[in-house]
Amino acid sequence: MFQDMHPTPDISHITREDYKDVYEPSEDSFLLMDALEKDADVIKKLKPLVCLEVGSGSGIVSCFLATLLPDPCIFWMTDINAKACQVSTRTMKQNNIFTTDSITTDITSGITERLKGSVDILLCNPPYVLTSTEEVGSKGIAASWAGGNKGREVVDQLLPTINKLLSPQGLFYLVCLKVNKPDEIISIMEDRYDMVGEIILKRRASNEHLMVLKFNHMKQETMAT
């Protein structure tokens, strides 16, 4: 039976001036939202209490997840770009989501210990474009796309924190490109951090091969089988 798609959050409050400094929702944003909608039953069954998005940009993805969940949840959002944090907060309020905290920080710096073992859903649409290392880590709009070597420099900094942050049943959703070597990312997570990963959604956008990876603790996978 045909099922209506979940509505996209209202982002009419974001201006063209805002988009000079903040990443505008694009194919990768919508692919991640589609992956969350596809996994909606699994996510709802988890009954998440704490969600975290690293690199929230406009805040549209966290907002989409918030409207997807039937019960209240605390949403943490981080971004190295202070303007993005402001816009993310506005996006949540525009859509009547008020259980949020947006923090200007590099990846999860300063909150890793605080959130240790408590994050039920972790989201990241990282900067994944292949660039020089010098372009990585700016505090402006370039921070949303400059990924450095293999487009993986930010991702590779994030990966070691995932198994520390996730709750025992927690799930991690990551956007990447084919050129970012997703199979290598999955192997790293399994071999170094005892996490199981898979590609759950793919899409071609222009000349890019976008995909969403999903990870959970290896112990969780063992218990499920």
Image (cartoon, helix red, strand yellow):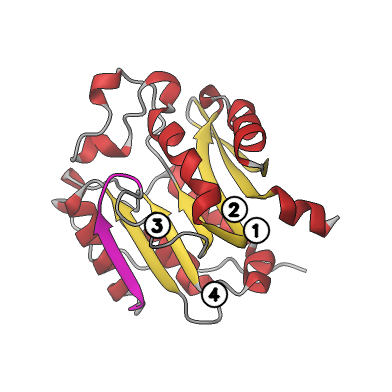
Q: Are marks 3 and 1 in contact (CB under 8 Å)?
A: no
Give the residue displayed 49% in from the left and 66% down from the top. 65
Q: Secondary structure at mark 4?
A: loop
Q: Disc 2 designates what residue?
A: 35
Disc 2 from disc 1: Cα separation = 5 Å
Name the residue rendered at 41%, 56% in the picture: 53
Q: Residues within 10 Å of mark 1 (few under 14, many from 20)?
A: some
Q: Nearer the viewer, residue 7 or 22?
A: 22
Position of 109 relative to 44 (above/below): above
Q: Indicate the secondary structure of the residue bearing disc 2.
A: helix
Give the image location of residue 94, x and y in percent. Answer: 29, 74
From what the image shows, is residue 106 above or below residue 133? below
Q: CA distance from mark 1 to mark 4?
A: 13 Å
Give the distance between the C-alpha atoms of the residues marked 4 and 2, in whole angstroms.
14 Å
Relative side of 130 to 32, left or right: left
- Marks 4 and 3, how far apart in space? 26 Å
Q: What amino acid type is highlighted by mark number 1?
A: Lys
Compare marks 1 and 4 and give the one earlier in the sequence: 1
Residue 38: give its label.
Answer: 1
| Residue matched to label 4 | 69
Q: Earlier in the sequence, mark 2 or mark 3?
A: 2
Label 2: few (<14), some or many (≥20) within 10 Å?
A: some
Q: Badge 4: how crowded within 10 Å, few (<14), some, or many (20+)?
A: some
Q: Secondary structure at mark 3?
A: loop
Q: Which dot, 4 or 3, sits closer to the camera?
A: 3
Query: Would you say residue 192 sits in the magenta stretch?
Result: no
Q: Position of residue 141 (x, y in %)?
A: 22, 39
Cβ–Cβ under 8 Å for marks 2 and 1: yes
| Residue 102 forms part of the magenta stretch | yes
Q: Earlier in the sequence, mark 4 or mark 3?
A: 4
Q: Which residues are magenta?
A: 98-107
Residue on which disc 3 sits: 113
